[in-house]
Amino acid sequence: MKVSFFPGCSLEGTAREYGESIEAVCKSLDIELQELSDWSCCGASSAHSTNEFLSVALPARNLSIAERKGQDLVTPCAACFSRFKAAEKALTCESKVDVGIPFQGKINILHMLEFLCREEFSEDIEKKIKRPLKNLKAVSYYGCLLVRPPRVTDTEHWEDPQALDILISRLGGESVFWPYKTECCGGSLVLTRVDIIHRLNGRLLDMAREAEADCIVTACPLCQANLDTRQEEIGDKEGVSYDIPIFYFTELMGLAFGNKGVRKWLGRHLVDPRPLLESKGLI
Amino acid sequence: MELIGDKNFRDVVVDAVGEEIFTCYQCYKCSAGCPVSFAMDMLPHQVIRSVLFNQKERVLSSRTIWVCAACETCTTRCPNEIEIAKVMDVLRQIQQESGKQAKEPKVPIFHKAFLDSIKKTGRVHELTMIRNYTQKSGELREKLKTGEWKNDVKLGIKMFLRGKLKVMPPKCGGVKEVKKIFEQAKEHKKA
Ligand code: SF4
Ligand code: SF4
């Protein structure tokens, strides 16, 4: 199976372990990810906060390349996904906008989570599991842009999405209920209003703890980075200490599949998940 | 009188976000679910009301439009399908085009640093973008004064040691096309 793959800017930097785990997991499932040739940035929140033309044209350039190739487009970043879906709607709706870049909406645009949770892979995933994630209690964190607004994302369950929860259970882990599945991590305020980032992420960490989860599972490089890199600062501010590992869902898949390189991916986290996994006998 | 305000302003917003905005019945649902309402000086439902009253200066000089995290909770939950998050976008666009100082000046400086990085290399190079932002926003100076730079350096070193900082800027074959998009965008201003 082949699809076009749009990695997005953070996969080469802060989200390197996300990229590495995606590559390994897809290889295990015989999925060939063909990186979109000459892809460019989707523009993220800065484009839609600055200029409407940019906010459609920057993603449109990539959508057009993917449509010419004729394969569905998969991206692991919730922000890229949301910008692509918004551009798709803007370019194909009744009152469509013209940015001088052809796109007719003939391909599907999918987030990596949605893609890997397709029915067609479920049997393969089950077959690949060598080491079920026994006793691992995880809360699923979807964040904002994977699901909202549903008119753009075409999501069916935006207040209580299930894909990650089902995946965690399928991998042998325990998906723990918590009410913050789709709360906001503050996204791009990360450099400008660190105080807001601290407050929003502190609430998420507190709730994960209250739910007695061992870890938080994400599907977005921005959410993962906000939750993983700020725990020490938030703890210092509030006089508590946080030590909650933040996984990418593909890392958990790779872990259950027994993929090589798992230790290396996990070694890139600021909050090292290896002691937790060792204590559960999972690595 | 504030009510009359700038005549064209409301129409510009309505053109961009659709006429549903007229159906707002001030139910508060958008404000009730907003995750950053604690940091706002006007709540989202008040912004919508102000736009309808054509109170251009009031909304454009608000803190709200910059601390809005674009999380789309308001848009998703509005019973009248009003695109509140998009209203915030349009207000940020108009404010940036005005060239005036924003209430949260660092946010538009961040957006500029981010977009400059795309314009230059087709993709965002995190290190260059952060360097430009900290210089231009005055954050570098502030942090040198308060000693907070030490925390940033500490975090930076941790990220570097974990292979999370890409030192070399990315190479993207599409950079010429991207530059063209930026050129065209100049002709598509709101106001
Ligand atoms: S949720 Fe919609 S109708 Fe209710 S106050 Fe907000 S914008 Fe108005
Ligand atoms: S999009 Fe902005 S205004 Fe709307 S709920 Fe999110 S942060 Fe609040």
Image: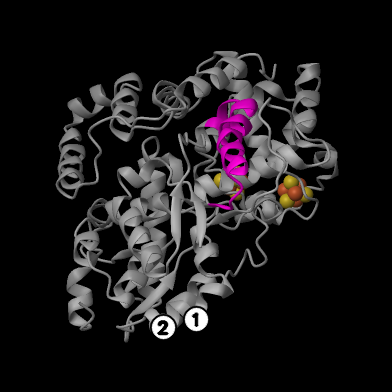
The kind of residue tagged 1 is: Glu
Q: Position of residue A153 (x, y in %)?
A: 64, 54
What is the number of the mark on residue A127?
A: 2
> Which quadrant holds the C terminus of chain A?
bottom left
| Of A83 and A67, the residue lying toward us | A67
Q: Is residue A70 magenta?
A: yes
| Residue A35 sits above or below residue A55 on the image | below
Instruction: Give the magenta range.
Output: A47-73
The kind of residue tagged 2 is: Lys
Look at the numbered discs 2 and 1 and tell me whether their residues touch, using CB distance below 8 Å.
yes
Identify the residue shown where x is 29% and y is 73%: A255
Identify the residue shown where x is 16% and y is 47%: B158
Q: Secondary structure at mark 1?
A: helix
| Of B60 and A258, the residue lying toward us | A258
Q: Is there any visible trace of residue B36 in the rendered image?
A: no
Left or right of residue B115, residue B170 in this image: left
Identify the residue shown where x is 64% and y is 67%: A157
Left or right of residue A35, residue B184 in this image: right
Left or right of residue A254, residue A275 in this image: left
Residue linked to disc 1: A123
Q: Main secondary structure of the magenta part?
A: helix
* Quarter-of-image position of residue A280: bottom left
